[in-house]
Amino acid sequence: MLDRPKKNGAAPKDKTPRPTPVPVKERAPHKTKKASLSLYEALDQSVHASVAKTMSGLAPSVLGEAWMDWAVHLAVSPGKQLHLMENAMRNAQTVWTQALSGQTGAPECDKTAPSPDRRFASDEWKKYPFNMMTNAHLLNWQWWQDAMTDIHGVAKPHEDLMAFVAGMMVDMTAPSNFPTTNPDVITATVNEKGQNFVRGVQNLKNDLDQKINGGHVPVSKEFEVGRNLATTPGKVVFRNDLIELIQYAPTTETVHSEPILIVPAWIMKYYILDLSQQNSLVRFLVEQGFTVFMISWKNPDASDRNLGMEDYRKLGIMDATDAALTITNAPKLHAVGYCLGGTLLSIAASAMARDGDDRFATVTFLAAQIDFTEAGPLRLFINESEVTMIEDMMAETGYLSSDQMAGAFALLRARDLIWAPAIRDYLLGKTDSHTFDLMAWNADATRMPYRMHSQYLRKLFLNNDLAEGRYKVGKKAVSVSDIRAPIFAVGTEQDQVAPWHSVYKLHLFVDTDMTFVLTSGGHNAGIVSEPGHKNRYFRIAVTPSDAPFRDPDDWLASSTPKDGSWWPEFTKWLAKHSGNRADLPHLGARSGHYAALCDAPGTYVMQT
């Protein structure tokens, strides 16, 4: 990353020419089955794809390299070995003492694992001998974390990966995962005379049938797009081969003159921002007097394998911008990007600023990253070997399937997304678990085109081209520092996809006024944080363009939390940067290219 020192006080920014970034040698475009492959190349690619499917897309060489680094350095660290032996003996003594005494009560606190541990939340786990089993498991988990970390000479990425894998392996042996050591399962089995296992076997059979036969199965019949999800009234006013553009109907007598264009991520469906009536960000913005446009991405198939990041920029953001401004006859609009859509928006906004296109009045980034050097647990697996394996896997189908993506994200939260559902569905035999709108949306996944996903992984995750000045639009590099429109950025405290420290690094790259919000919740729930939602809070602070840089921890310490939702602060900020109120715009053009095509939510969102 280029050093971009901030100025002190009110002094103007240093505009001296920056050093030219050292070029990164680009890997030759990966060949697919559509390209000409030699017999040997085709054989290699086929084998790699088979290995990728077997390993759920994870390259074994990534783990092998990390293990070798860890094992070699541990072997020549006798002090660390003695420390681990001492801890192992102390842990064994603790467990044996508890076992012989038969004492009850809560297990020792796991100081390293996420807290609280919901696996052992019921009172049954506090009773002997289950409390002893729990304590032994937590001590074992802590020991393995200690064994994988703080070894002199081990590379930090390898250390993090080994700790992650060790934690997953130990979690597989948790007493909660087995019917004979889980008191909740034992109680259910006695009370139901084993019928929980009968239902569990049926649940397992259904899941295996679905896995083998494929097909799209909704998470619940309680929710349906267009019935109680994505119900804000509107019209599809534009459609091309990649997007449908939705314009929402106004509910106020007048509207702010500048419309809002929302660019959601295409890894999931757009209606994360238009869930139920009570927690729809779209509906909230409309009720505050804004004209809102939403991009609804097509769910790509094999025929879309060659769609790239540039196609998503042109056919997505640029075509939608043209449509929104033409329909409303406004000179500028407020651009809002969420997650991966925010990253793409930063690229589009940078290219527009570079080329003198000032049609963005403001730019908002919701849980979006510009720099990918600290991109959370996903960084553990991203290297040349891993990206190549994913490319080989996509080469056969032309896309990355939703199941493959879901599996990768499930590994990041295996306790909640793998083991907890397995216990609930197969051991307790529950079939009517409570479903809510966010869960229904989360199950409605999409595919990722081969070329686009390859470029995203290589240019952004692997090479960090955008942050380091190498990402090119129109054969010329773009820089986020060229954006002059005011910026509103939101990070979420518990985000594992876009950690807030990584989102906060936007401060290092922009040369404009920025308002930063840190809200409670995770990557999705933190953004879907409607007014009235209990136990929500946020922090907010403005950093003028001429203010000195503050590191994220200093920012956190100096920012006072406020109870409630950050949405009202967002609409106040938008209103501040908007012009006079205007008459209500027509839904789509009265005729021609942007005439209304159908009612919202449209057709692309229904694609499976």
Image (cartoon, rainbow, N blue to C red):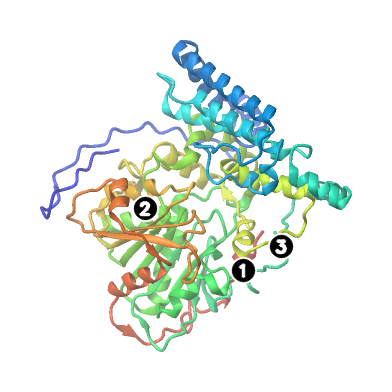
Circle 2 Cα neighbour tier, 10 Å, few/some/many (<14 / 14–19 / ≥20): many
Question: Which residue is located at x 40 percent, y 19 percent?
Answer: 153
**Tags 1 and 3 touching, CB below 8 Å:** no
* Amino acid type of the residue that numbered disc 2 sits on in the rendered structure: Ile
**Tags 2 and 1 touching, CB below 8 Å:** no
Distance from label 2 to label 3 (Cα)? 37 Å
**From this viewpoint, which residue is outermost toward the right?**
193
The local secondary structure at tag 3 comes to loop
Question: Which residue is located at x 41 percent, y 86 percent?
Answer: 584
Residue, disc 2: 347
* Amino acid type of the residue that numbered disc 1 sits on in the rendered structure: Thr
Question: Which residue is located at x 45 percent, y 48 percent?
Answer: 498
Question: Which residue is located at x 46 percent, y 33 percent?
Answer: 28
Viewer-proximal residue, 292 or 136? Answer: 136
Residue, disc 1: 603
Q: Quick check: can you spot residue 435?
A: yes
**Tags 2 and 3 touching, CB below 8 Å:** no
Picture quadrant where residue 408 is located? top right
Distance from label 2 to label 1 (Cα)? 27 Å
Please name which of the two marks, 1 or 3, marks the residue nearer to the observer.
3
Picture quadrant where residue 465 is located? top left
Distance from label 1 to label 3 (Cα)? 20 Å
